Amino acid sequence: MNIPESKLPRIVIIGGGFAGVSMAKTLANKDVQVVLIDKHNYHTFQPLLYQVSTAGLEPDSIAYPLRKIIKTHKTSFFRLAEVEHIDASNNVIETNIGNLAFDYLIIATGTKTNYFGNATIEANSMPMKKVPQALNIRSLILQNFEKAAIAKTKEERSALLNFVIVGGGPTGVELAGAIAELKNHILPRDYRDLNASDMQIHLLEGNARVLPPMSEHASKKAEQFLKKLGVHVHCNTFVKDYDGTSVITNSDLYLQSETLIWAAGVTGDPVSGLQAESLIDRANRYKVNRFNQVDGYSNIFALGDIASMQTEAFPHGHPQVAQPAIQQGKLLGKNLIKLIQNRPMKPFTYKDKGSMATIGRNKAVVDLHRFKFAGFFAWFVWMFVHLMSLVGFRNRVIVFFNWSYNYINFDKAARLIIRPFKREI
Ligand SMILES: Cc1cc2nc3c(=O)[nH]c(=O)nc-3n(C[C@H](O)[C@H](O)[C@H](O)COP(=O)(O)OP(=O)(O)OC[C@H]3O[C@@H](n4cnc5c(N)ncnc54)[C@H](O)[C@@H]3O)c2cc1C
């Protein structure tokens, strides 16, 4: 892999997501050699993927080159590679571009979409975990509008203009709100040959309320906002099957739709090679102690979504969101230096800063420890936090400009079918 040999201990980080990047930054220019490996050459800001899917933002404003993140880190290297196996007994990782020995290994591979074993849904639905997948959704939505404009029958047109989103967590709620804004502001202007009232957006949630991880107040407000935007919200409803057109649910709800977006859950994305006992089967997450050390190993660590650190406050591990990943990455960076210097490491404690979701312009919900609020101020807070969390000044400026432009003009400028979506059969 063309990584120079050195006297410095080698720390290999698999994954340039929130956890891996935060750790790599903490280790910048320390007395260690850092090798950051990712199968993409960019970091993805997943919380804004839904805006790429709905033509609100260009993909490059939510992605950031990993090499640029470490460009001033003199002892750090990046390799574009997929790690295929960990040979833990020899301290070697095997990748599609060669093998590499490590002194310390950090697994920060995050999650992948969970279809709960339903192959038909997997084959026919649209996931939204990666930038190319968000672009597929954008193309499909716009292609469906174009096809609907020339549809011969009402049934054909309805199936093209029915959008079904499965999963009423933050991702599903944000996506449903953004598609509703396309219906309310873009469709009537761009597609005068279509009737906007023919377009329907259905949000299906298996629990009794949307945003189940948030407060009841947030759920109630979010549902009100969604309904105001014209989204049909179906709680206690889960999809049993989808063949590309017919949506079969557990209730008497039956929908015909050419577009089913699957935002119903994720599962860990581990790398093969570690002992089976290190992995919690149900969630596909590595069992780690308070220092993020993987159960059974002293020099292998797991961080972020892929790690399950079970504590009294979090018996099932931390929530799979950005903050625990960032905080664990920072602490493990400092802890590894201590470990190398034979100093005691500090155990991890999660500082929960609260949660939030946006439903559309002027509409968001925020849960903080003491305060829960919704509406315009919540939306403003949501925008500020997301803008500040983006990696890179350029991305912040571009996103700020886009949001201001979209707000003033009720526009979503990136409605381009650059690479048409074709379903693989
Ligand atoms: C659509 C969506 C919306 C979200 N919205 C929010 C939100 O609003 N707020 C919030 O806090 N959280 C949100 N999350 C969750 C948040 O993005 C995750 O919790 C966070 O990304 C976890 O960070 P991570 O570093 O553990 O993993 P990731 O950020 O997923 O990074 C994992 C990295 O590992 C790489 N990788 C995986 N396997 C390999 C391999 N074998 N070889 C090489 N590289 C590999 C991947 O390419 C990826 O870059 C959202 C997630 C999604 C999908």
Image (cartoon, grey):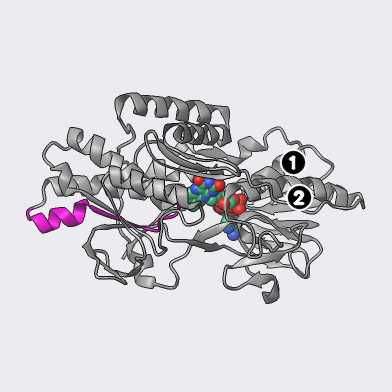
Q: Residue at 32% across / 64% down in the picture?
A: 124
Amino acid type for the residue under numbered disc 2? Leu
Which mark, by number, is residue 26? 1
Which mark, by number, is residue 85? none
Mark 2 and 1 residues: CB-CB less than 8 Å, in contact?
A: yes
The span shown in magenta is 152-169
The quadrant holding residue 190 is top left
Q: Is residue 121 above or below residue 78?
A: below
> Left or right of 28: which side holds 253?
left
Question: Mark 1 near ligand 1 (CB under 8 Å)?
Answer: no
> In this orientation, does residue 102 appear?
no
Q: Residue furthest right?
A: 342
Camera-side residue of 377 and 121: 377
Lower position in the chain sequence, tag 2 or tag 1: 1
- Disc 2 secondary structure class: helix
Coordinates of residue 106 in the picture (x, y in percent) = 71, 56
Residue denoted by label 2: 332
The quadrant holding residue 353 is top right
